[in-house]
Image: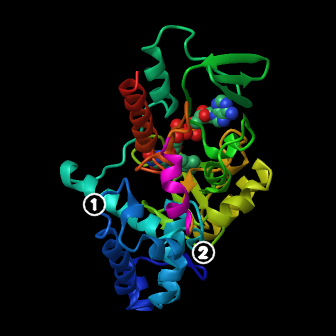
Amino acid sequence: MFRDGALLGPADLARLDPQLGDELDRLEDFFASVAAGISDAAHPAQHPQAAHYDSLSAADIVDQLELGELARLFATRNMQGEFAAEPHEVSALFVAQQRALYEAAATPHGEVVAQRIVGGVSGVTAGLASALPQGMIRFGETVDAITIDETGAHVRAGANSYHADQVVLACSLVPLRAVAFDPPLPPELAAAVHGLGYGRVTKTALQYPERVWPAGYATTTGRAQRVYEPTVGHPAESGILMGYTGGEGGTRLADLAESERMHEIELSQREMYPALPPPLGGFSQAWSGLPLFGGSYAVYRPGEITRFWDVLRRPHGCIHFAGEHTATWTGYLEGAVESGETVASRLLANR
Ligand SMILES: Cc1cc2nc3c(=O)[nH]c(=O)nc-3n(C[C@H](O)[C@H](O)[C@H](O)COP(=O)(O)OP(=O)(O)OC[C@H]3O[C@@H](n4cnc5c(N)ncnc54)[C@H](O)[C@@H]3O)c2cc1C
């Protein structure tokens, strides 16, 4: 943790605030206790007190538990990192649902492991597409209107129009808000499509000729929020420091030009590691500023599990929704795949 001009390790933090570890444990214990009431992570609204916990935010829980300043800071950074949102923007029931999911996944696999996809994530979709006949997947066309009649759906993408018996909308809900539906979606569904929260992450990578930083993840009170080295284990002398900035901090950075973002993050990294040489280069990506994404991934805000969870997972006539925001593994690649399998099974079963 970088705070008040000093890098603090676990022992420094324990000296500074002997309650810190206990307070963070109490917070996780609270979410674990709510998670214990979720018998199936695919249906969090079936929790016996779903409406109550969904009405509360993670910030409300932090207040109820009367966490101290340092524990609040860690809790905030954890929410900004995990949910790409501020604690007041995350439903307490949603946090518990994610904890229930991890708990359930940890049992068959032993533990949940993080992995990188060599060559980038697009390799997954390219690999899936390669199994299909050529030309079946059409790239670079943006759906802008969907008309439903007794014959099915007419999908317009710019100058092109397609007729379909069934339509699977697998994009984030933010770009979907610009798609014209005729007839309009029913009010409950339209409210979910237009209302669901989205996290904001801005990632800024800077490459330095030497690695003058200690290994590991660092949390900072500075603008970068979280700084880590994605090049750990890479043999080169130079290395990359990533700034992972979520929630309101991510939005603030998204409003700047890329060069300004890189400058801000360099300053934030430099106050942590004053010996940093000038960077060799870098890039910054703000998902909230990309029209076809409009955010990083879904975050169910207070009240949104009870209002939006089920309606987004039901078909509307020949229209089916897929994507991480409709999955049990919301916010993850696993969720994107899971939702595709769910909709594909439904379509095959109804053939
Ligand atoms: C910074 C960041 C870090 C992440 N880290 C992880 C991680 O460590 N592990 C993990 O599992 N997940 C992570 N995720 C989440 C993961 O990337 C998403 O959950 C996943 O990509 C969602 O896949 P999807 O298919 O639902 O949606 P998307 O990946 O958003 O795909 C939807 C596609 O629809 C297209 N589209 C949008 N609008 C239209 C339109 N009108 N017409 C036609 N096409 C359209 C888009 O161009 C896009 O290609 C991270 C996300 C971000 C932003």
Identify residue for label 1: 103
Please name whichever residue, 49 or 151, is drawn nearer the observer in this view of the structure: 151
Q: Which mark is residue 218?
A: none
Mark 2 sits on what residue? 221
Q: Up-down: is 219 above or below 212?
A: below
Q: Is residue 104 visible in this depiction of the protein?
A: yes
Residue 48 picture quarter: bottom left
Indicate the amino acid at tag 2.
Thr
Against 159, residue 197 (above or below) is below
Compared to 268, does 17 lie above or below? below
Amino acid residing under circle 1: Glu
- Which span is picked out in magenta? 303-314
Residue 46: x and y in percent read 37, 63
Give the camera-side residue of 145 and 62: 145
- The residue carrying pointer 1 sits among few (fewer than 14), some (14 to 19) or many (20 or more) residues within 10 Å by Cα, namely some
Residue under the image location 49 percent in, 75 percent down: 75
Percent x, y of residue 188: 62, 53
Quarter of the rendered structure image containing ligand 1: top right
